[in-house]
Image (spheres, helix red, strand yellow):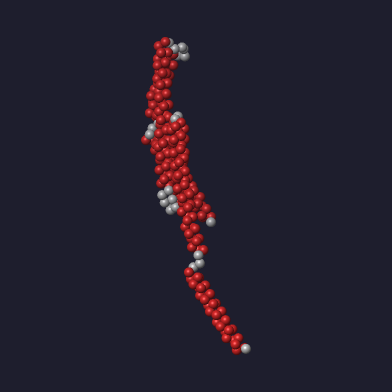
Amino acid sequence: MQRDRQNYALQTIFSFFLGLMVLAFVGIGVNTFYESPDQKNQPELDKLYRQQEQINRQTGGKAFTPAQEAENAVVQKKIDALQKDLEAKRQIWARNTSIVLIVFATFVMGISLIRSEQLRVISNGLLLGGLLTMIYGSGWVIFSGQSTARFAVIVFAFAVTLALGYLKFARQHDDVASPDMAQAAVSSTPPTSDLDGLTARVDALERRAAAAAAALGADVPANE
């Protein structure tokens, strides 16, 4: 019993660790091959910030000269335009990243259904990793800034989770219950050999009763 508990605990830990590894693998993979706008535009933004800082140093703590004020205004205008463009790109990137993550989560959860009874530990780990990735992807869609897109992604994630949950638990429960019910029905039916033996006993009793009745019928005239 103690060994079974230790084995079960190790299987649970392995499944949980596998789920975290799936989440890390998918998340890091998506961010590696689909870079965020911050990674692409941050160098240009940092360059503008350095130009602005250099203008501030030139003043020596005094007020801007007309030339410095004009130059600072031009730099600030570029910074504002770049930040506005960056915010729009962030929303698109968040939406696309969410969709990609949910697609990968669906794929991983689908794989977890393959031979889930034979590979229960790995199947549970993949299922957990898919669920965590699904949650991670659903979180990114919040930053997409588009209510229609957010709702569509959330509805898709909910439908996929519900369908795979049914395939994982409800259908397998029905498949397991059916053989058990069939086995119970078979076990409740008396074996053929027992029926034959019971029939033979009934026949023997009937023959004895007929013989006894014949004997009694033969004794009555003799007594008279």
Above-or-below relation of 22 to 117 = above
Determine the image quadrant of residue 75: top left
Residue at position x 46%, y 31% from top? 147
Which of these two is toward me, 207 or 86? 207
Place of residue 209 in the rendered image (x, y in percent of width and height, measured from the top left): 56, 79
- How many marks overall? 0
Which of these two is toward me, 129 or 55? 129
Residue at position x 53%, y 75% from top? 202
Place of residue 121 in the rendered image (x, y in percent of width and height, measured from the top left): 45, 50
Place of residue 115 in the rendered image (x, y in percent of width and height, measured from the top left): 42, 51
Which of these two is toward me, 5 or 59? 5
Q: Residue furthest right?
A: 224
Q: Quadrant of the C terminus?
A: bottom right
Residue at position x 42%, y 33% from top? 95
Above-or-below relation of 197 to 153 = below
Place of residue 50 in the rendered image (x, y in percent of width and height, measured from the top left): 41, 21
